[in-house]
Amino acid sequence: LIPTGNEVVLSLSLMNQILSFDPLSSVLVCEAGCILEHLSLFLRPHRHIMPLDLGAKGSCQIGGNISTNAGGLRYLRYGSLHGTVLGLEVVLANGEVLNLLSKLRKDNTGLDLKHIFIGAEGTLGVITKVSMHVPPAPAAVNVALVGLDSFEKVKRMVGRTRGGLGEILSAMELIDGQSMEMVVGKKEWGLRNPLAGSAAAPVAAATAAVGAAAAAVGTEGGSAASPYPFYMLLETSGSNEEHDKAKLEDLLTLALEEEIIADGALAQDVGQANDIWKLRELIPVAIEEKGRVHKFDVSVPLDRFYELVERAREGLREEGVGLATAGAGAEGGREGVSVKVVGYGHLGDSNLHLNVAVPRDRPDPPAVSRVLARVLPWVMEQEGSVSAEHGLGQLKKKYLPLTKSREVVAVMRGMKKMLDPKGILNPGKFFPAEE
Amino acid sequence: LIPTGNEVVLSLSLMNQILSFDPLSSVLVCEAGCILEHLSLFLRPHRHIMPLDLGAKGSCQIGGNISTNAGGLRYLRYGSLHGTVLGLEVVLANGEVLNLLSKLRKDNTGLDLKHIFIGAEGTLGVITKVSMHVPPAPAAVNVALVGLDSFEKVKRMVGRTRGGLGEILSAMELIDGQSMEMVVGKKEWGLRNPLAGSAAAPVAAATAAVGAAAAAVGTEGGSAASPYPFYMLLETSGSNEEHDKAKLEDLLTLALEEEIIADGALAQDVGQANDIWKLRELIPVAIEEKGRVHKFDVSVPLDRFYELVERAREGLREEGVGLATAGAGAEGGREGVSVKVVGYGHLGDSNLHLNVAVPRDRPDPPAVSRVLARVLPWVMEQEGSVSAEHGLGQLKKKYLPLTKSREVVAVMRGMKKMLDPKGILNPGKFFPAEE
């Protein structure tokens, strides 16, 4: 909420009324300033949930979620906002109110204009009201954490998980070993890695395998806080506790037998499930304390998903930059600076979060900048997306003409000119200067 | 495929190549002329299915499905094409090729332009290539048919079914008694109503209840071919045969006990399941033989869903038009003409198909036209959609300004002018003449 030039910042926080909810059709209509978490709490006694959930739920507004086409933790199960948003009310730059507030799941009357405002980052109009299809609350939610020795095995487990859990799979998240160490290392949070420190046979066997994997990639080593280089958080949401638990237990047993996973833990109650989720959700909070964080939110085909993190670490090492590992400090490398590199994200959507923390008290060393400058071009070479779920904003707008063709950018500009000819809405965001 | 004026009809049927399929990410890329059923057959050995299915699958092309934003039988489970289409290639009116062919589930780089072409009925560009997220084939599919005494009970059963089947529910279709009679009456198809002619106790009890219901609504009576005024087809698609069957059986047992349904039959093999589906899918084919068919494809809130069919029948009766019931002929009423009125559709999406067959050999009697003219205005009063899944085309384009505001239609026109300034693409479709 920082004006970047001669701008007025518009807050919709007083437009926070829920207008209607119909449990029979599962349709919620509300004003755009409603906080995501408030909507979730409102729906709880009606046994429904919001189709999206993300770390910022306590402060983000639904209008902003839609304007940025937010993805988040439930995308795998409930899909894109282009599917769950049924209607919008939008105020245009000329003050006209566009009433697109349908409550119907199917309505093919003319062009479906609401879609151009989803993910438009506020550049085409101001979303003021929202109509959404919200899913019924699942009767049973189960959470498991598994440890794996290599990213090859993570890929195999993705296939097994899709096959074994099918329609009840609601989250499939990646936590890398350094992310795990970092979160567990925050002693005041009191979180533990349920797969660390166990003396059971599979863990011992796996620890050895980790050593081999670590030697191969040259970056990861097992530690007390994180015996494995990779973890997957699996969540099921279904209508029958007994059936769902049976499916999840069968999957873990089979994956252990086939040595795809090295160890696994199934949450026994809601408290344990929440704790496992915190191991994933607090990664972006934990890394903020390691320095100023460069965040990359990218889509990369699953086959080469984690290679981006490995390339970043390798590049930094080659440039003589120190890599912080477990614990607070690390030697500074020959450049006298140490950075922290972690990778995590949504395996089910091929959406990786690469975070790089650099020292806060000084500008980025040129060596770091050189390496980070190679990240997004590599993503484009893989036909990935340089902005998976966070939008281009102003920082990444230079990438628009690099990832989209001249013709595509021209149509985007045409739409902007039609709806906001004076360019008063969110100026300077995502549209690059005309050449 | 009939030119309406001085037009050239463009066929894409030679652009029928499948370009790539990646089972790991479940992404299919193909040319727009591919026939929907060919794509389904291609995916079968890869254990995936198309996210949409409809009666015309053997002849419709995927580009046309997307241009009309087709709904169909799997909408309830796999959602809108706005969610499953990942990318498009579109040729614009000026010959430029718009490359929007992303294969990523998440890609927030600038405006997501593909959405304006989904459901645009070919008025903004010609879709030439398609990239889609296709779901893994379910391991188990189960189909049941239940008979109900009133639409009130249908509504209660919708709630029970959503709760009991949850994430495995893949279809919830309505077949009214007259539709059932008509399809079963086509002797050459050899189909039977699995809930007819059984001597089991629940059926006998239910037949009596049907009599009462029929008296109340004044239109429906039990017959040998159709002892109930309403049927629901329930389908589950899941990953575990045993779990899915248990859920479906529990639901039917409970609904019988609570007298929400009067009878039910669970298909015991694929042949029986296909036969139950035919009872639903062949309704539009069967009614074509009853005369020239007026088809209404509308969204109506579930609460008043079937009232539209009852109002049509009642209105016709009041106007002195005869209503054909079981068997071929019917007395012609005092207007000397008899019509057939059936209602069926997708309960899960609140999408009703009202079909009215009138004699082929003469123009519509004014009495019939008067009644049919009241259908869509009533739908609009209920905040329904006059075109749920079939688009406005040219027949219904006069309804665009009646259902959408002046501002909304103006933005649609602005887009059309920007992308097709000479109006050469699908002229005369859905955009009404400028006032």
Image (spheres, coloured by chain):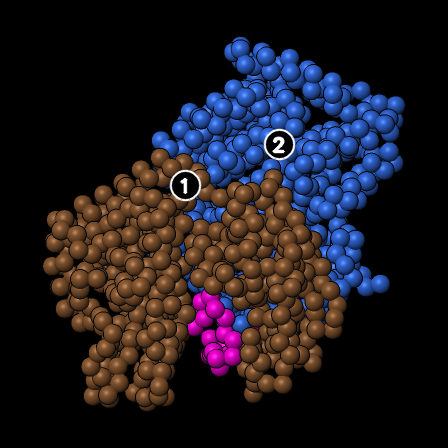
Chain colours: A brown, B blue
B313 on left or right of B113? right
Which residue has dot 1 on it? A140
Q: Is residue A225 above or below residue A382?
A: above
Name the disc covering residue A19, or none.
Answer: none
Label count reads: 2
Q: Position of residue A163 (x, y in %)?
A: 33, 46
Q: Which residues lie in the magenta part? A: A386-408
Which quadrant is the N terminus of chain A positioned in?
Answer: bottom right
Observer-nearest residue: B209 or B219? B209
Residue found at x 35% / y 88%: A362
How far apart are the alpha carbons under marks 1 and 2? 25 Å
Which residue has dot 2 on it? B155
Q: Is residue A397 magenta?
A: yes
Picture quadrant where residue A120 is located: bottom right
The amino acid on which the numbered mark 1 sits, given as a three-letter code, is: Ala
Crowding at mark 1 (Cα within 10 Å: few <14, some 14-19, many 20+): some
Residue found at x 36% / y 58%: A278
- One can see residue A303 in this view: no
B96 on left or right of A178? right
The mark closer to the camera, 1 or 2, is 1
Q: Position of residue A326 (x, y in %)?
A: 22, 70
Circle 2 SS class: helix
Q: Where is residue B419 in the image (x, y as percent from the top left)?
A: 66, 70
Q: Is residue A107 magenta?
A: no
Q: In this view, does B234 lie above or below A235?
A: above
**Disc 2: host chain:** B
Residues tagged by mark 1 and mark 2 found on one chain of the structure:
no
Residue found at x 48% / y 28%: B251
- One can see residue A99 in this view: yes
Q: Is residue A259 above or below residue B322?
A: below
Residue found at x 85% / y 38%: B370
The amino acid on which the numbered mark 2 sits, given as a three-letter code, is: Lys
